[in-house]
Each structure stands twice: as structure tokens, then as C-alpha cells.
Image (cartoon, rainbow, N blue to C red):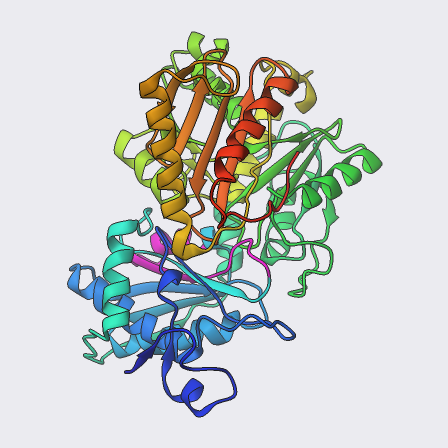
Amino acid sequence: MTVNIVGQARPNTFAFETSALIKATGFREYDARWWFGQPGSEKEPELNLKGVQAIGMGLGTLIRRMGVGPDIVTGHDFRSYSMAIKMALVSGLMAAGARVKDIGLALSPTAYFAQFALDAPSVAMVTASHNENGWTGVKMGAQRPLTFGPEEMTALKALVLGGDFDLIGGGSYEFVPGFRERYIEDLTAGRNLGRKLKVVAACGNGTAGAFAPQVLEGIGCEVIPLDVELDHTFPRYNPNPEDMQMLHAIRDKVLETGADVGLGFDGDGDRCGVVDNEGNEIFADKVGVMLARDISGLHPKSVFVVDVKSTGLFMTDPVLVQNGARTDYWKTGHSYIKRRVAELNAIAGFEKSGHFFFNPPIGRGYDDGLLTAIAVCEMLDRNLGKTLADLYRDLPLTFGTPTMSPHCPDEVKYGVVAKVVGEFTKMKGDGIEFAGQPLANLVTVNGVRVVAQDGTWGLVRASSNKPEIVVVVESPVSPERRREMFEALDAVLRRNPEVGAYNQTF
């Protein structure tokens, strides 16, 4: 099969219908993400259906060479083009000898659950997650509950772009009916809240609208639906609980209805955002601290994993210290945190993006936004007489920012971040002050986390799934120190002309 780089096979041409179009940068650190195209968009596609078929051939070849059995689960999210992409992927998988078990329209955690329930070691979930319409991608794994990391993604990229396929045939296809109900039953069985919580379930018209209300009702919540009707045009906003627009909509509905909590889910249901009963939009890392307090109270000396974008409270919170909890800061990315949780046998892992991972006895180790929602509700149920706002106020006060992402092309973003890391390493070595204070620490496990003497910190890293840089800032001191750190970090970034405008600031 001929593979073309972007620009050689344009839509509405013979080449587009007869050769595989795949942009190399779509193979990212731990999943795959491409611009597939959108009516009216001037942006050229990075992938076509022949390219998707080639990805299936490559994935089927890879899992066979890894010595993994041929059974693989597949599903798709609610986009106008996702089913077509999935079936093209399936045709490639079958050509490489895979036995495909298709669970249909699904959340990513539904597909992860299916690996256990259907005894299939591998998964290929077609989803663009929270990305805007026109994007597509695949979340893959061959060792439940883990998903691919850089090593597997690099191997897959080489196979696909090199056309190095083992097309042994003998594959098969099976559609598994009724799997949505099976997944919902697994989440809700044996879970019954002691008090009736009024919960806003916000789905941004994404796939979670077909799952979240039923799960929350199944554990005994009174559900107030918000944008739960499936509509792949996403008429109000992208289903992304890290975006302030969605959080503001949840806040407004919570205040309007007097709900106990607002819960928001992203496009493929593996992330959860939280708004308390007073309308406070709680960033996911602070939700993680509250859950860590609750979990470590039940399981003393718990080990947690958090990503480098997360609040410093995981290290300093007095309740976590009292409960003997230990926290490991690790690389951002669902595959990285999932793998680290497994390596350390941590009871849970938390990402600032809202990917939460629960090991037994709570979960199976993969990220599931609906299980996160259940954990929040059960935490409230265990704290009778306290509202979610009360639990939030109980945390030591810090001043954080949302995740802010200036545009930066995929081809140069890692180079830009490497330059920034180099600048800060030199500053620290030379004893140069930054944002008005000496540098107390640099964490360079994933980009650079710059920590000032007063505990104020800022992070710069490359996004793993979009052409963006990621910036997060937090201060335990004041909003002014938060602003000083952000402006100082931004000034360093602006030395690189490739860095564009932010998607949001604070």
C-alpha cells in the first residue's frame, strides 16, 4: 500500500481515493490524533479512509509481533464520521488476522471495560476525545488496563509509514449487542447512595449523554440533564470539562437548580469536571486532593500518582500527611499516569485534565469519567452534614489557573519546550532569580515545572495530542504571585516566534 505524506493526496482527486494519506505527526506520544476534515474548513486533511485502513493493518501486525493474541475490542464515539473510520480500521485489522469484537457506539472506558468482560487483550477505540469536530484518532492498548506509550506508538508509526504489514488474513468480525447496558450495570451494581444527591450531568452533546444520566440514576442520584442529547455538531461548545465555557454552563445550571454538584464529561467519557453546590468550578487537581483525603482516610498510607500540572497540595496537605499518604509526580498523559499507577500499585492516579485512575478495590486501573463521578458522589455520601463547597473550603487555599494552551506547530513544539527547559536549567545553575525570587526547584520529568522559593510554580510542556504548548501556574501565596509567575513564564515563551495565541487565560 502506498502511503502519502500530507499534500500529495488532496480531497476530490484520484490519488485521495487510491492511496493512503497519513500525516506522520498524528502518531503522538500515547495515542493517535489527526485532522480528518470538516465541511467549510480550509485546513487540508491529514488522514483519509485508506490511511485509516493502513493504521488497522499496522496495529494488527504490531500486536501479532508483540505476541499478543488476535482478539481486539473496538468502538467509536459520536461524531458524524467515526463509524466510517472505525469500519476502515476494522478492515485493516482483519487483513492482519485480528479477531475484532465491535461494541458499537461507546465511551473509551466502555471499550477498556470490554477488554476484561470479553477477554480481549487489545483495544482500538476510535475517538477524537474532546477535540473539535473534524478531528479523529485512536486510543490503543495491548495489555489491559494499559494503553500504548511512546515505545509502542513509535513502533506502530514505523510499521504504517513503512508499509511493513503481515497481511496473514484469517481475521473475523463480531458485533457485540447490548454492551452499553452491560457496562452501566457493572458500574452501578452494589452502589447505592445513602442520601439523595441532586446532580447536574453535563455532556456537551457528546457520547456521554447516552451513558452518564443512567449511571448516576443507577446509584440513586436525582439527575438534572444538561446537553445530554447526542448532537455531533456540538451546538453549544466542545464537550471538554477543562474548558471554562463548559464549566460556566455547569455552574449556571447548578445555581439555577440548587444542585448538590455539577459533573461534566468529555467527548469520550474518560474525564470528569466538577462544580460545587455554590457554583465554584473546581479544577480537577483540587478534586483529586479531596478524593485523596477521602480514600486515604479509608485506606491509610495510600500511594497516589499525579501529573506535573497538578497542585502542590498533594505534597503538603496536612490531612494527607496525617493519613500517611505518599504522592508521586509523573508525566502528563493518560497512558503515562495509568502505567505509573500500575508500576507503583498506587490506589489512584489523578491528572489535572480530569483523567482519574482507580486501582482495586475501587476500579480496574483505567480512566473512567463515570467512575470518577461515582467516587465524588460517594465522597459526599460519606461526609454527612457537609456540602461539596465545605469540603473544598477545607483545603488549604492556593491560587491556580486553568490549563492554558498557546498554539505551536507539532513539528516544532518539542524543540521550543527543550529550549525553555535549557534556559531554566541555566538560570538555576547561575543562581538567577525568576519572577522576583530564587528558583527553589526544577522538575524536568515532563517539560519543566519551575518552583519559586515561596512555593509558587509554573509549568511549560508540549501538548501530547494537539499542536500546542501547555502552561499551568499556581501560587499558595496570592493571586498577585500567580500573575507574576505567569507573566514571567510567558515572557520566556515569547522569545520563540513559533508560539501563538492562548486558547484561554485567567
Q: Which residues are magenta?
A: 110-132
- Quadrant of residue 439 in the image? top left
Please determine whether, in this image, residue 113 is positioned above or below residue 96.
above
- In screen coordinates, is 298 left or right of 59? right
Quarter of the image that includes the C terminus: top right
- The answer to which quarter of the image holds residue 15 is bottom left
Q: Is residue 496 magenta?
A: no
Q: Nearer the viewer, residue 227 or 39?
A: 39
* Residue 477 drawn above or below residue 136: above
* Quarter of the figure that contains the N terminus: bottom left
Q: Position of residue 245 (x, y in %)?
A: 70, 45
Residue 465: x and y, percent? Answer: 45, 52
Q: Position of residue 164 (x, y in %)?
A: 20, 73
Q: Residue furthest right?
A: 256
Residue 124 seen in the current view: yes
Q: Position of residue 217 (x, y in %)?
A: 65, 44
- In this image, 413 relative to 65: left or right? right
Residue 360 seen in the figure: no
Q: Is residue 118 magenta?
A: yes
Q: Relative to the observer, which residue lies in front, 63 or 45?
A: 45
Q: Is residue 416 above or below residue 399?
A: below
